[in-house]
Amino acid sequence: MRYLLPILTGLAMTLGLVHLGLSALMSVRAWGLDTLWFAGSGLAILVAALINVVMIRARQIDRVQNAVWLVANLVLTGFFGLAWLLLKEPQVIVGGLVFALLSAGIAGRVIVRA
């Protein structure tokens, strides 16, 4: 678990940055609502990944921090699940799996420390 969470966090960060990069490319052709939503999704993925970075590096973690950490990852897992209903693409599966595995890893850490 020591190495799995950082690797998954790196994948999540990469996914968010790629999303933002593709948003920038899309905005060159036409700036619109779809581009803005796509960029916002990339920002949400990136923020969740950054929460993971902060929490992985934290020396001490209390119950509230654990809850925020877990909820952030569960919310992104849920959003990827909803996205799958409309967009059956591999990147949606990858994002959903990354955040589901992060959620499971965090939940496992909470159980072990209890």
Image (cartoon, rainbow, N blue to C red):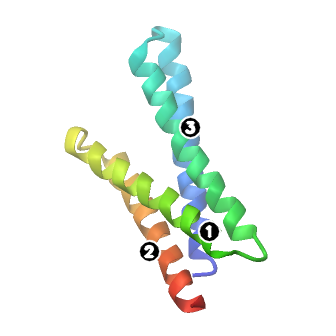
- Name the residue tied to disc 2: 104
The mark nearer the N terminus, 1 or 3, is 3
Tell me how far mark 2 sits from mark 1, CA to CA: 17 Å
Q: Which mark is residue 7?
A: none
Of tags 2 and 1, the one toward the viewer is 1
Numbered badge on residue 64: 1
Against 19, is 10 above or below?
A: below
Instruction: Indicate left or right for 65 with 112 as reference.
Output: right
Disc 2: CA contacts within 10 A as few (<14), some (14-19) or many (>=20): some
The three-letter amino acid code for the residue at tag 2 is Ala
Say how many tags the image has.
3
Callout 1 secondary element: helix
The N terminus lies in quadrant: bottom right
Distance CA(mark 1)–CA(mark 3): 23 Å
Instruction: Please tell me which residue is depicted at 51% across the width and 87% down the height of the picture.
Output: 111
Pointer 3 residue: 43
Disc nearer the start of the sequence (2/3):
3
Can you say whether 56 is above or below 81 in the image?
below
User: At x 35% / y 54%, what residue is drawn?
Assistant: 78
